[in-house]
Image: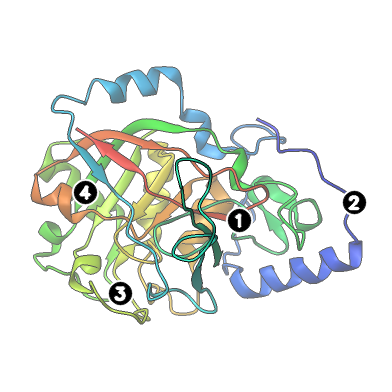
């Protein structure tokens, strides 16, 4: 699937400034020569979303035996903790409710609303334009072909397909014997294998994998963001990539363990998943209801909002069992 045509040619100076800001803010310090993996060809823009096939959707549909639906997105508002300087504001326009003229013989009243918000807030999906390495993004795409001040030229989340696939939830609190898990706890490849064995599930190509740490539930009602969190570790990220997952998510604001296992590296798992392999990240996923019902696998569905050129997306995926 190709990105939408460029709306107009961007000023090269502006592109350079924006690319520099993004790279300085988010570049993961990974020095491997083979950092960019071109598994799906030089022109690919979907990464592991190429594994979202009709066969995978049919497989997921067979997991629906009760018809129970779980909403994996949290409620987002002005008090939602967010990675600075991200903020959310809702404005309701009272067009004629209470004092305006009534509309027609049915005497109707109405309201509209405007949302002024950062998109990377609350439950969210990170697209490939979020993280780069040395001014290059997924598939070794130069920043000048990606970054623009009025919307991404490539990798905008509006171009993502609908996600209908198998979801797997791994309860990491049982592996570590803590609930919630401690800040900085990193899920390794060995930990993921233990969790799969304990729950009797296997992660397969095209799956979406969610991790439960108990961290979101334990911090419910907080209005400031915790500087650290448990989450996916470096070896765990590489392992998920080898298994062919489409997306990885968790009940924390960054998915990955913070602080990192290597304190010199900044958001290394983001770089590994998004930039190296082309695997989407799902943050602030509501997982405790699935855990309470003992759900290990389910049908995962997600339609990403069609906001042209968006780096991220505020989402409310569904888990159906």
> Mark 2 or 1 closer to N-term?
2
SS of the residue under disc 2: loop
Residue for badge 2: 9
Residue for badge 3: 184
Left or right: 6 as drawn, with respect to 246? right
> Mark 4 or 2 closer to N-term?
2
Left or right: 151 as drawn, with respect to 170? right
SS of the residue under disc 1: loop
Q: CA distance from mark 4 to mark 2?
A: 45 Å
- Residue 115 makes an appearance in the image: yes
> Mark 1 or 4 closer to N-term?
4
Q: Nearer the viewer, mark 3 or mark 2?
A: 2
Residue for badge 4: 170
Question: Height in image: 117 above or below 250?
Answer: below
Q: Residues within 10 Å of mark 3 (few under 14, many from 20)?
A: some
> Tags 2 and 1 in contact by the CB under 8 Å rule?
no
Q: Residue at x 9, y 44 (%)?
A: 294
> Mark 3 or 2 closer to N-term?
2
In the rendering, which numbered label is found on residue 311? 1
Q: Residue at x 26, y 70 (%)?
A: 185
**Residue 302 x, y percent position in the rendering:** 41, 39
Left or right: 299 as drawn, with respect to 122? left
**Residue 153 x, y percent position in the rendering:** 75, 49
Q: Nearer the viewer, mark 4 or mark 2?
A: 2
Camera-side residue: 238 or 18? 18
């Amino acid at each position: 699937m190709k990105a939408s045509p460029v709306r107009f040619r961007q000023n090269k100076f502006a592109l350079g400034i924006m690319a520099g800001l993004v790279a300085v803010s988010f570049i993961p310090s990974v020095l491997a020569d083979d950092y960019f993996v071109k598994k799906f060809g030089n022109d690919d823009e979907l990464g592991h979303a190429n594994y979202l096939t009709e066969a995978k959707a049919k497989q997921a549909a067979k997991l629906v035996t009760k018809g129970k639906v779980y909403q994996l997105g949290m409620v987002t508002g002005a008090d939602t903790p967010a990675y600075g300087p991200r903020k959310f504001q809702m404005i309701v326009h009272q067009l004629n409710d209470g004092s305006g003229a009534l509309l027609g013989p049915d005497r109707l009243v109405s309201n509209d609303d405007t949302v002024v918000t950062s998109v990377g807030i609350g439950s969210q999906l990170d697209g490939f334009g979020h993280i780069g390495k040395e001014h290059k993004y997924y598939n070794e795409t130069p920043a000048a072909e990606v970054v623009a001040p009025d919307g991404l030229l490539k990798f905008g989340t509006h171009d993502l397909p609908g996600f209908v696939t198998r979801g797997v939830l791994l309860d990491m609190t049982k592996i570590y014997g803590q609930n919630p898990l401690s800040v900085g706890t990193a899920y390794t490849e060995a930990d993921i294998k233990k969790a799969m064995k304990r729950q009797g599930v296997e992660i397969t190509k095209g799956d979406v994998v969610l991790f439960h740490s108990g961290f979101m539930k334990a911090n419910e009602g907080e209005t400031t963001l915790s500087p650290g969190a448990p989450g996916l570790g470096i070896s765990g990220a590489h392992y998920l990539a080898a298994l062919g997952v489409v997306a990885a998510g968790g009940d924390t604001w960054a998915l990955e363990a913070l602080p990192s296992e290597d304190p010199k590296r900044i958001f290394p798992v983001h770089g590994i998943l998004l930039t190296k392999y082309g695997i989407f990240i799902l943050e602030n996923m509501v997982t405790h209801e699935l855990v309470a019902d003992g759900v290990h696998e389910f049908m995962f569905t997600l339609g990403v909002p069609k906001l042209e050129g968006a780096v991220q997306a505020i989402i409310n995926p569904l888990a159906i069992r």
